Amino acid sequence: MKRYEKFADEIADLIRSGVLAPGEKVPSVRHASRTYGVSPSTVFQAYYLLEDRGLIQARPRSGYFVREHARRRLPEPEISPRLSETTDVDVSELVFSVLASLRDPHTVPFGSAFPSPDLFPLQRLARSMAHTVREMPGREVVAEMTTGHPDLRRQIALRYMVSGVMLSLNELVITTGAMEALNLCLQVVTQPGDLVAIEAPAFYATLQVLERLKLKAVEIPVHPRDGIDLGTLESRLSSLPIKACWFMSSLQNPLGASMCEGNKEKLYALLQHHQVPLIEDDVYAELYFNQEPPKPVKSHDRDGWIMHCGSFSKSLAPGYRIGWVAGGRYAEQISRLKLMTTISPSVPAQAAIADYLQHGGYDRHLRKLRHALERQQGEMLASAARHFPASTRVTRPSGGYFLWFEFPERVDSLQLLQLALAQGISLAPGPIFSATRRFRNCARLNYGHPWDERSEKAMELLGRIVKSF
Ligand SMILES: Cc1ncc(COP(=O)(O)O)c(C=O)c1O
């Protein structure tokens, strides 16, 4: 990471944590250069970058100021409450009915699980698809089905290497999206009736997979900023026969929480001590706002306990259904289970993504995508501060495209969804993220679509509905 990028990240962290408030002047170039011992051109470059990320703006002859989207900020939510020890999972019907109600393409898509397709290089990807399919030797279409297309596996391993994780190619299995990877991992390490530690709140599909496989959930609270509560996890691992953990250590869905490096290392030590595997769901890994990618728990994996699952669905190619798992000591079993079920994701789709990764400018696309998402996050936070009740709490994640709102206790988000849908606005209500249908007064909102007048109006309307409870 270059010096100016590091300096920009330090300032961004001060803005995100509220030390530098909206409207406040950031240190002048001369002052910053003297105080932090960096050259004026480093400060200038950092400020240009922060301007591009939508965090500060220049005022003629006055210097740089934190963007004043709104006069006030909403506070952050606190840690989620203590939970029962173990629970059966029975949420699938609720999840399906909510997801069905979000499908109308005419609604403002705050409930969507994807960012806007306009943010993806779909035309460029189509060129890679056309080119690779035209050139593909007939033999390759059937020969490369087992563990995955060799070029794609090599490109993925290279990306791990650049982010500081050394992988053997033998560990990598390409799958039909991360969803297949996550399912296979869980099936390899559990039997019906086993206990699995999951997050609370958790990605709703995690709950559905546990329900389908007849597994019991041990819910571990997630701090909205710092991630999994390691104290609770430690005591549950000591007192219960947990067979596997399924966690997101960075940019958790729905909270956006990311564990710090130290806690990821502690988590690994804990798992290693109890000899419990971790299924690490890291599908938002590429959508971090700061310059350095967060390292996964996998980067500490010395003994193969971590099955690290990734995907191109959120960062490059939604609909191509290409994901993967670096399966550690379970890679062979995962690969065999895949051969017994889906055999392989589409070989042409794999080849197209491999070609794009090699020639298409993935890193350039990601930089643009991250900046767009960070700017849109600023817009939604500011709009919420303008229109939602002052007692609303909201997360401030350092990446991804979701905000988690905690409304006043009296607000019922399932009812809120119905009222919002009637006005053409969708949202993801809190109870679909909980094995025990908690988080009734919470909702996840998606800011992955370019911000416009319609988004602003929708926030104003939502605010009015929330106040009517
Ligand atoms: C946390 C999380 N994990 C996994 C997935 C599934 O990813 P894929 O589309 O690659 O199957 C999603 C998609 O919504 C997700 O949000």
Image (spheres, rainbow, N blue to C red):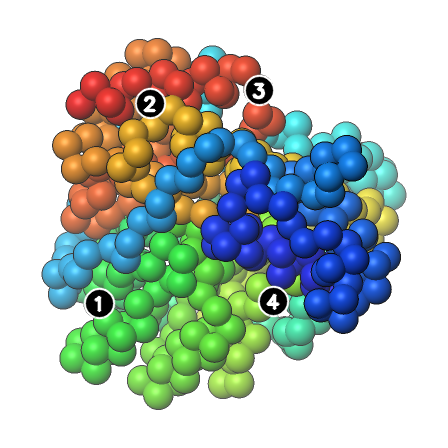
- According to the picture, the residue beneath numbered tag 4 turns out to be 172
The alpha-carbon separation of the residues under discs 4 and 1 comes to 26 Å
Callout 1 amino acid = Asp
Residue 386 circle label:
none
Classify mark 1: residues with Cα within 10 Å, few (<14), some (14-19) or many (20+): some
Callout 4 amino acid = Leu
- According to the picture, the residue beneath numbered tag 3 turns out to be 452
Mark closest to the chain's N terminus, 2 or 3: 3
Percent of width and height locating residue 99: 35, 30
- According to the picture, the residue beneath numbered tag 2 turns out to be 463
In front: label 2 or label 4: 2
Query: SS for tag 2?
Result: helix
Mark closest to the chain's N terminus, 4 or 1: 4
Callout 3–callout 4 Cβ contact below 8 Å = no
Classify mark 4: residues with Cα within 10 Å, few (<14), some (14-19) or many (20+): many
Answer left or right for 161 relative to 309: right
Callout 3 amino acid = Asp
The alpha-carbon separation of the residues under discs 2 and 4 comes to 46 Å
The alpha-carbon separation of the residues under discs 3 and 1 comes to 47 Å
- The residue located at (74%, 49%) in the rendering is 47
Answer left or right for 47 relative to 145: right
Callout 2 amino acid = Gly
Classify the position of the C terminus by image quarter.
top left
Mark closest to the chain's N terminus, 2 or 4: 4
Q: Nearer the viewer, residue 432 or 137?
A: 432
The alpha-carbon separation of the residues under discs 1 and 2 comes to 42 Å
- The residue located at (52%, 80%) in the rendering is 301
Mark closest to the chain's N terminus, 3 or 1: 1
Q: Nearer the viewer, residue 62 or 195?
A: 62
Residue 194 circle label:
1
Mark closest to the chain's N terminus, 1 or 2: 1
In front: label 3 or label 1: 3
